[in-house]
Amino acid sequence: MSFYFIIQSGPLTGARYKVRPNLSIGRGSSANISVQDANMSSLHAQVQQKGEEFYLIDSGSKNKIRIDDRKTESLLLKDGVVFRVGNTKIQIEKVSDSAQMPQEEKGWKKLLYDNLSKKSFKNFEENKTITPFSKIPELTFITGLQRKTKWTLGYGPRQIGPGSYDLPIIGDDIPDICFSILQKDCDIIFETKHSDKVLLNKKRTDTAKIKGDDIVYINNIEIQIKLL
């Protein structure tokens, strides 16, 4: 018999992870299950095996492991149990080794692929005139499921968002095209049609000149823009 963690809320909803000794969950990139959850610690909890039983052990986090609105530092893994780590809800599922294996574990790249496969790319403009950037925009994800992902843009205009065919973002309740990067004269320009949801340097603006150390805020996603 094998146990699986099934993520039931947040950006990894639907992902399954086979339980094994030392499997870790947290907000940090070093965790085996890395979740962008502000209420998680960098290394929030870790699986330990004791005999034939598995336990999820808190790693000294502030919010602990929660089950039935009760905080605990040690959780015996049983089929059907639902618990929370930070704001992320996780269910435990027990699967017979002879049964069909659940779907593979999904990191952000797999989720992104699944998301893109459903897109028709209605925003793709085949005959759009492109212009090499005089200064190269470098976009780095600071937070979000794609944290530490870096894009270097050599030409424009470029569209960024879930509906972009080459610069897609994964996120909940965000516009299909969040913003665009383009060049006007010698300036690199930020543009958005969703200034209520997409902020530049924490301010609402439809268009602005990129200065070279800017941050775009889209819900819980932060993207830094530098000019090389």
Image (spheres, rainbow, N blue to C red):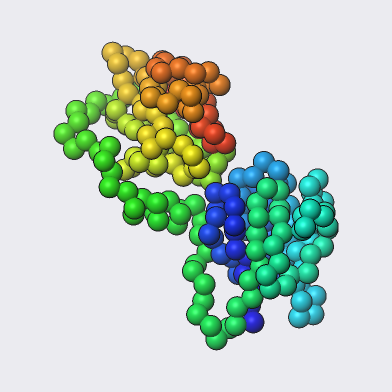
Seen as rendered, the residue at the extreme bottom is 98
What residue occupies the far front of the structure in this picture? Answer: 68
Quarter residue 131 falls in? top left
The quarter of the image holding the N terminus is: bottom right
Answer left or right for 176 relative to 24. Answer: left
Residue visible at 71% across and 55% down in the picture: 84
Asked whether 204 or 46 is in front, the reply is: 204
- The answer to whether any part of residue 10 appears in the image is yes
Residue 155 located left or right of residue 8: left
Occupied quadrant, residue 186: top left
Image quarter in which the C terminus is found: top left
Relative to 144, residue 130 above or below: above
Along the line of sight, which residue is nearer the eye, 14 or 225?
Answer: 14
**Placement of 76 over or under 188, stated as above or below:** below
Looking at the image, how many numbered discs can be counted on the residues? 0
Q: Position of residue 33 (x, y in %)?
A: 62, 57
Relative to 227, residue 17 above or below: below
Q: Residue at x 52, y 72 (%)?
A: 102
Image spot of residue 124 (x, y percent): 25, 38
Q: Would residue 29 be seen by someone viewing this image from the given angle?
A: no
